[in-house]
Image: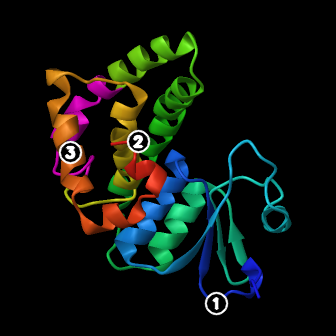
Amino acid sequence: MVQSARTRTVLTLYTTADDVQCHRVRLILAAKGVTYDRVLVEPGQAPPEDLLDLNPYGNVPTLVDRELTLYDTSVVCEYLDERYPHPPLMPIDPLSRARLRLAAIRIERDWLPEMETIRTGGRPADGARKRLREQLLSALPLFRASKFFLNPEMSLLDCLVAPVVWRLPWLGVDLGREGKPIVDYGERLFHSQGYARSLTPEEKAMR
């Protein structure tokens, strides 16, 4: 008998197979080594009834932890980091934490809409590729500043940036020689066991 999400004793994540924000949460879970049930939701189709019972918006990612349901991606990410504190994925000092949060907001508002435009195809995709490339290259100092993005250790922000970089070849965004620091950053993360565990078969096929 299939258990409902509210009766399961482990985490349940409602996720699509290739969405960046869903991948972001899966990467955090993989980095923490957390066991969870994965429920795949098909984009473009009506959300499953049990998801609508849990989340009135029916969006993903949605995380269920026993009686608690979370469905804002940033809230989900920070909850997981606090719920499973090892390894920590946010710096201790408030200034660094605020800087990483602001960078995540910029990426969500600037990079992700361009990626969605490219995904939908058509003539606007060419302009979106150009704008996304320019935005990434303008962030080169941030990729060069430390081993990870804006931080000496892997953080929640890397769990957003790495899935973006992973998708660039699939989206047809070529950074050229100028973008080598971004490519190198991605390769450092992509070869970790945690990153491999975070991938769905659809995401593996992007490269």
Note whether 25 is above or below 145 in the view shown: below
Residue name at image x 38 percent, y 56 percent:
97
> Of the residues tagged 2 and 1, which is closer to the observer?
1
Residue 194 image offset from top left, x and y in percent? 32, 67
Give the residue type at disc 2. Ala
Label 1 vs 3, first from the N-terminus: 1
Q: CA distance from mark 1 to mark 3?
A: 37 Å
Label 2 vs 1, first from the N-terminus: 1
Question: Could you tell whether 141 is left or right of 205 in the image?
Answer: left
Q: Which secondary structure, mark 1? A: loop
Residue 153 image offset from top left, x and y in percent? 23, 61
Q: Which residue is mark 1?
A: 9
Q: What residue range appears in magenta?
A: 136-151
Q: Which residue is mark 2?
A: 103
Numbered label attached to residue 163: none
- Within the magenta stretch, is there residue 169? no
The residue nearer to you, when weighing 186 against 160, is 186
